[in-house]
Image: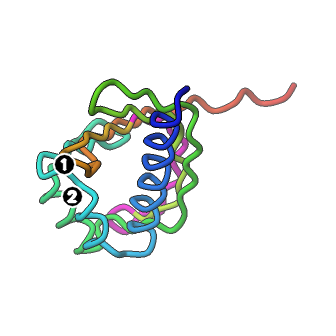
Amino acid sequence: MDNATAAEKDKIVALEEKRYQAVVDGDYDAFEDLCHQRLVYTHSLGDRDTLSSYLEKLRKGYYRYHRIDHPIEDIVLIGDTALVLGQMNADLTVNGTHKTLANSALSVWIKEGETWKFLAYQPTPRKAAPAAA
């Protein structure tokens, strides 16, 4: 991997950290600043939000994130697009109900000029580990 690619991947890692921390901290303006205006945010059960509908739910407390762990397994750069493959493990409240998530996740970032913007998110629930015999 060349230095330019490594530097871009480092930027994406930092941006992923910022976006997750922003929703945990309730800093929805910071989250919005990271997002592309055409964001497609898919949830674990398959429902989707636009940037405006997701922000409205966050700001009204429909979603309240308490903890998010997000190990990154790989970042694939193709032109001005970055695919972030990893996990999203979280404790949150959804419309008043506590939930714990264990998802594989794909985040998509696109570069506009010199700025990376969060364009899409797709989680997939992971199967629970089999119980020990």
Name the residue at 44% across, 52% down.
Answer: 16
Give the image quarter of residue 95.
bottom left
Q: Dots 1 and 2: beta carbons under 8 Å?
A: yes
The relative height of residue 118 versus residue 45 in the rendered view (above or below) is below
Residue 104 within the magenta-colored segment of the rendering: yes
Q: Amino acid at mark 2?
A: Tyr
Find residue 94 and report its horizontal and vertical position in percent.
Answer: 36, 61
Quarter occupied by residue 40: top left
**Nearer to us in this view, 102 or 7:** 7
**Is residue 125 visible in this depiction of the protein?**
no
Q: CA distance from mark 1 to mark 2?
A: 5 Å
Residue 67 visible (yes or no): yes
Q: Is residue 131 left or right of residue 70?
A: right
Dot 1, how many residues are within 10 Å of its Cα: few (below 14), some (14-19), or many (20+)? some
Q: Which residues are magenta?
A: 94-106
Name the residue: 12% across, 52% down. 37
| Helix, strand or loop at mark 1 | strand
Residue shown at the point (41%, 54%) measured from the top left: 15
The image shows residue 109 at horizontal and vertical percentages of: 30, 41
| Residue under pointer 2 | 54
